[in-house]
Image: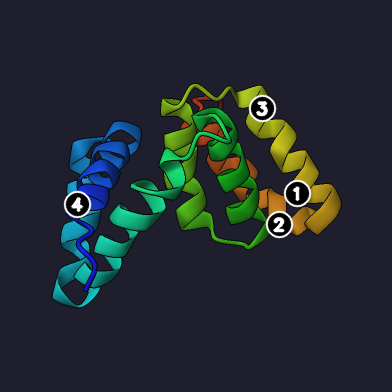
Amino acid sequence: MVDTSDLHARGLRRRQKMFGEVDVAKRMAAAGDFGTPLQNIINAYVYGDVWERSGLSDQIRSLVMLGITAASSKPTEFRVHAKGALANGCTAAQVQDVLLLVAMYCGIPAAIETSKIAAEVFGEAPAEG
């Protein structure tokens, strides 16, 4: 088996920087024993490897993630990445433009719920229930 401890440590640091130590700890704990291997893969390869590449800035990478999660109707993950986008310096106007692209290319329903989430995260609308 390949030693991924360095990747894992880098990824964990990046996740904590983007989402906060408390939120990352909660997500990892919620995964339980069954989900721990997946969390390890996320830390090592998603955040320790792919997010560490130099081809895209953190802002652009966050905007891409918002487009992907909105287009694939993953509102829970969209909310997580919207918080990360805010931490990475993305603006509400940038996120709005991403969601307009999602609406045009993937259909308006794909952008409706995520637009509400983005407004909440970026402080432009009260959270619902």
Residue type beneath disc 4: Lys
- Quadrant for the N terminus in the image: bottom left
Q: Position of residue 8 (x, y in %)?
A: 23, 52
Residue that carries the numbered disc 4 in the rendered image: 26
Tell me the CA gap for discs 4 and 2.
28 Å
Whole-angstrom CA distance, mark 4 to mark 3, is 28 Å
Disc number placed over residue 94 in the picture, else none: 3
Asked if marks 1 and 2 touch (Cβ < 8 Å), the reply is yes
Mark 3, other Cα within 10 Å: few <14 / some 14–19 / many ≥20 = some
Residue 109 visible in the displayed image: yes
Label 1 environment density (alpha carbons within 10 Å; few <14, some 14–19, many ≥20): many
Residue in the picture at 26% in, 42% down: 10
Mark 3 or mark 2, which has the lower sequence index?
3
Residue furthest to the right in view is 104
Depth check: give the residue in front, 89 or 122. 89
Q: Secondary structure at mark 4?
A: helix
**Kind of residue at disc 1:** Val
Q: Say which residue appears at 24% left-offset and 62% top-offset.
A: 40
